[in-house]
Image: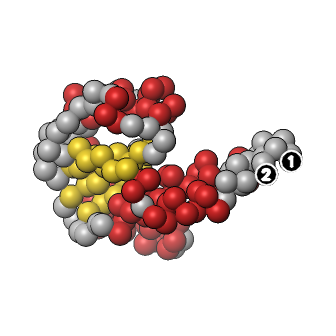
Amino acid sequence: MKYKIVTCFNETILNKNAAKLIQQFVDKWQPVKSIEFHCYYYDVDLSNYSLPESKNIFYHNLEELDDFNSFMERNKTHDGTEAGAIEYNVMLDATGQAPKIFALSECAFNNKDSWMVWLDPYCYTMKDIRLSSLKNILSIFVCLLCSLFLNLSKFKFFVFLYLIFL
């Protein structure tokens, strides 16, 4: 099983934390082919930065996507203030959230037989992440989702056991 870790950043986020997050991926995540880190970026020229390179780190420029550019242009007034007409409201900030959605969508369209996991660019890796760690975390997550959807108390334990021993 492969794992695609996905994040997205612009220059502000890169300078605040994303550069550290990428370095932490190199330093603290198990270097195996089955864990890939896909970094989607916009509003930044990566040639001005010295970011880590690895066989399992991939950088994707969202601004190379026609759909992304046309969406951002069409919705530039929907910046959370409706072009300054109202006080900022995150629920109305289409352009602020769009890069994340495009990053996840692009990775999903190019995904086959992999888990896809969103990693917020403001995250911090506190300890080493191993392949076994990802399997355990995602097994528990799937169990929780199954519990919510099944909502049949007598089957919850069996679903949990089934997923743990997959």
Q: Which residue is mark 2?
A: 82
Q: Amino acid at mark 2?
A: Glu
Q: Is residue 146 left or right of residue 98?
A: left
Q: In which quadrant is the C terminus drawn? A: bottom left
- Tell me the kind of residue under disc 1: Ala
Residue 100 makes an appearance in the image: yes
Crowdedness of circle 2 by 10 Å Cα count: few (<14), some, many (20+)? some
Q: Is residue 77 left or right of residue 117?
A: right
Mark 2: secondary structure: loop
Which residue: 48% across, 26% down? Answer: 16
Residue denoted by label 1: 85
Q: Position of residue 137 (x, y in %)?
A: 34, 49
Tag count in the figure? 2
Q: Position of residue 5 (x, y in %)?
A: 32, 49
> Which part of the image, by quadrant, shows the N terminus?
bottom left
Can the viewer see residue 28 in this picture? no
Name the residue: 49% across, 66% down.
67
Question: Secondary structure beneath disc 1?
Answer: loop
